[in-house]
Amino acid sequence: MLTPLEVERLSDEFESKTPQEIIAWAIDAFWPQVAMSSSFQTQSVPLLHMVSQINRNLLIYFIDTGYHFWETAIFREQLASQWHLNVLDLYRDTRWDAFARNNTRKLPLEDPNLCCYIHKVQPMQRAMKNMLAWISGIRRDQTDARAQAKILELQEDGLLKVNPMLNWTKADVRRYAEEHDLPSHPLFEKGYRSVGCAPCTVAVGADDDERAGRWQGRGKTECGLHTEMFKHKDFSKLKRDFYLDVSIMERRKDAR
Ligand code: SF4
């Protein structure tokens, strides 16, 4: 277990390392309690390709929200089978099922923070419970929140977040994809520069910001996996950010 000071020192050191070096370090240091997350969109492909070459047994979590485009499911299958990736799908806790089914349309449109919590944040919190390190594909040039991230981030619960792509830019991703002749998500050429769930993603222009089509016009830029929401395990504090009535779930304490 690394101390906060060691994490800080290593993180600074990694600023000049390649993503492949950082990935290899994380796998060596934390195996087998290390996993990666991927949304299997065009931007994710270089990191997936690197992992397929470094250690294809690395556990890769794909969060199946139930709201994905069918093209994402196909692309996930294509990459996983072509590169023999060790992909595990994550789903919402079944104790949310009745609530989620009663609010299928409302959730993404009226309360996207709650929807992301149920379908993305909580499943990942649970999946990471027994892990020591989480490799993610975020980049500093994607959002204001990500611009502040560090390559290594130690959470209070001891989980180490490893962000090997942090220093890469959109141009680096494109260059790597061209050099290695990598496939792109079927919706990319249709203007979907960043692909999330169908109710929360629209196509954008070639000159628009990469993530401009995510939750467009709703004042939301992050799902919560890479913000404070992920670090909060206490549902009673999080619910202040939700609009829909979750009291039915509050009575079911075991659902949290
Ligand atoms: S991105 Fe949209 S549909 Fe997907 S979990 Fe978040 S709010 Fe729900």
Image (cartoon, rainbow, N blue to C red):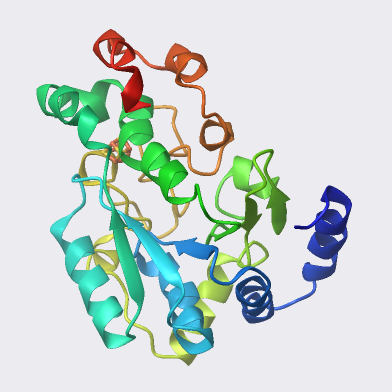
Query: Picture quarter containing residue 139?
Result: bottom right
Q: Is residue 134 left or right of residue 125?
A: right
Q: Residue at x 44, y 52 (%)?
A: 208
Quadrant of the rendering where the C terminus is positioned: top left
Q: Residue at x 26, y 51 (%)?
A: 64
Locate residue 40, reporting x and y percent.
34, 65
Q: Please tell me in which quarter of the rendered image ligand 1 is found.
A: top left
Q: Nearer the viewer, residue 207 or 68?
A: 68
Locate residue 222, reporting x and y percent.
47, 39
- From this view, report whether residue 170 is shown above or below residue 128: below
Query: Picture quarter containing residue 78?
Result: bottom left
Q: Residue at x 69, y 38 (%)?
A: 156
- Number of residue marks: 0
Q: Is residue 22 left or right of residue 11?
A: left
Locate residue 216, reporting x and y percent.
35, 36
Locate residue 140, reporting x and y percent.
64, 55
